[in-house]
Image (tube, rainbow, N blue to C red):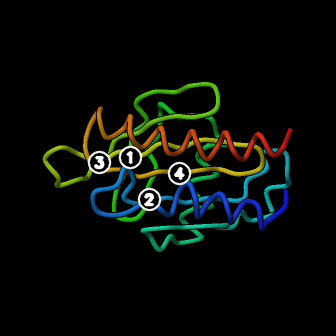
Amino acid sequence: MEWAFVHKIWEKSISSNVGSGQPLKAALLLNYDPNAPSRLMSTIAEQEGIMADPTEMCELISFVKRNKLQKESFVIGQNQYLVTSIHESWFCARSMSTSKPAGEGAILMQTGVFFLIGLYDGSIGSASRAMVVLDQFSWQLNRRNH
């Protein structure tokens, strides 16, 4: 995939939707090929609103590859997450370690050779707004792929 195109739609779809008052509090785009050898470390292609630890992101990818989404938890930053719903190419999780009254959540989506992660504050309404942003990015990325 052409990197300039990926960066352009990231800036348009994701960067402008991260921050205070926006649907996302943070977002990550990881290089991810489920068929690649495990010795090829996934790398952080883009990030906004978070300084992710590459080792932590590799552990997250391992969590996904183990495919025990409802039996284990995963960590992003200071939060430990538990998967609450699983769909064909994405899943949602809620933070078990948040101190925020409305909670915190994560949406993780596989799109081609990328793994897209959106973090948000709040509950159902916040999750819906975050999903719209992530789905728009994924659609643009997949449209270019086909």
* Mark positioned earlier in the residue sequence (1 or 4): 1
* Mark positioned earlier in the residue sequence (1 or 2): 2
Q: Amino acid at mark 3?
A: Glu
What is the distance, in whole Å, between disc 4 and disc 2 at their CAs?
10 Å
* Mark positioned earlier in the residue sequence (3 or 2): 2
Q: Quadrant of the C terminus?
A: top right
Depth check, front residue: 139 or 97: 139
> Which type of secondary structure does the marked residue at label 2 adopt?
strand
> Which type of secondary structure does the marked residue at label 3 adopt?
strand
Which residue is pictured at 17% across the width and 52% down the height? 100
- Residue 104's label in the rendered image is 3
> Which type of secondary structure does the marked residue at label 4 adopt?
strand
Q: Which residue is mark 1?
A: 81
Depth check, front residue: 122 or 6: 6
- Residue 117's label in the rendered image is 4
**Tag 1 near tag 4, CB within 8 Å:** no
- Residue 76's label in the rendered image is 2
- Between tags 4 and 2, which lies in front? 4
- Between tags 3 and 1, which lies in front? 3
What is the distance, in whole Å, between disc 3 and disc 1 at their CAs?
9 Å
- Dot 4 alpha-carbon crowd within 10 angstroms: few under 14, some 14 to 19, many 20 or more: many
Image side of residue 85 versus residue 55, left or right: left
- Dot 3 alpha-carbon crowd within 10 angstroms: few under 14, some 14 to 19, many 20 or more: many
* Mark positioned earlier in the residue sequence (4 or 2): 2
* Mark positioned earlier in the residue sequence (3 or 1): 1
* Rendering coords of residue 68 (x, y %): 56, 34
